Image (cartoon, rainbow, N blue to C red):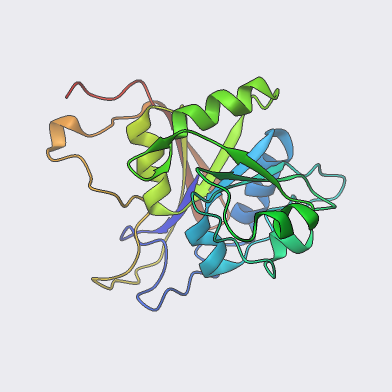
Amino acid sequence: KYAMTLDGKSAACTGHSRWVTGETARAHVHETRNWLSAILVGVGTVLADDPLLTCRMEGGRNPVRIVCDSHLRTPLTSQLIRTAKEVPTLLAAVERGETAEELEAAGAEILLCKEKEGKVDLADLMTKLGARGIDSVLLEGGGELAFSALEAGVVHRVQAYIAPKLVGGRTAKTPLGGAGFPTMDRAVRLEHLSLTRLGDDILMEGDVPCLPES
């Protein structure tokens, strides 16, 4: 899931991103959080935004919070760790860092995964989550993690919230980072598209069939 402006930016050139979309679209995100098992972000998102990643709707259920944090850089002072005893919080890593014991004492669980190119192997992470009965994961950011997940073949569906705003900025963040696919014929083309109007914003949803052959 991601939100972007009409010119494809997920944040302004300053990094400011609150809020790309309006209240109706944001409320829809919390509905999605309510019915999925878990929510996943990268440690970069934690360091930049200090999110809480809870379901803020009346009677809602909080998903298990997962941070893809290869070398355990999640701060002990972050909202996620300060509330880890209240909401299940997993830190997916490839090694136990210096703060591992303190993170665990605060209520977080460290889930060691296989390493791939110096980072958490996302396919292995999904296998481990499935073994725990976690059958659905909402990936909320950021761009590097999103592309890595797409490239790893673990993305089944895309939710793109599009706001009628133009923010520009050659250095402004976009929903997908990473190396990118080199040609348009290798781009991932979504299937079974649907469009939903949410206030002034539009939600485009589609299924990811499979990655193009190398």
Residue 23 falls in which quadrant of the image?
Answer: bottom right
- Viewer-closest of 103 and 46: 103
Identify which residue, 66 or 74, lies in the foreground: 74
Q: Residue at x 52, y 35 (%)?
A: 113
Picture coordinates of residue 83 (x, y %)? 79, 59
Question: Viewed as shown, does residue 172 lie left or right of 142?
Answer: left
Query: 84 left or right of 178?
Result: right
Image location of residue 131, percent across then percent down? 65, 20
Quarter location, residue 11: bottom left
**Percent x, y of residue 100:** 65, 54
The relative height of residue 96 versus residue 113 in the rendered view (above or below) is below
Q: Which residue shows up at 20% across the image and 39% down it?
A: 181
Q: Is residue 6 above or below residue 148?
A: below
In this view, the residue in front, 100 or 23, is 100
The image position of residue 32, as x and y in percent, is: 65, 40
Q: Is residue 82 above or below residue 161?
A: below
Relative to 213, say whether 49 is above or below. Answer: below
Q: How many marks?
A: 0
Residue positioned 74% across, 49% down in the render: 55
The quarter of the rendered structure image containing the C terminus is top left
In this view, the residue farthest toward the bottom is 14
Instruction: Report if residue 193 is visible in the image.
Output: no
Q: Is residue 11 visible?
A: yes
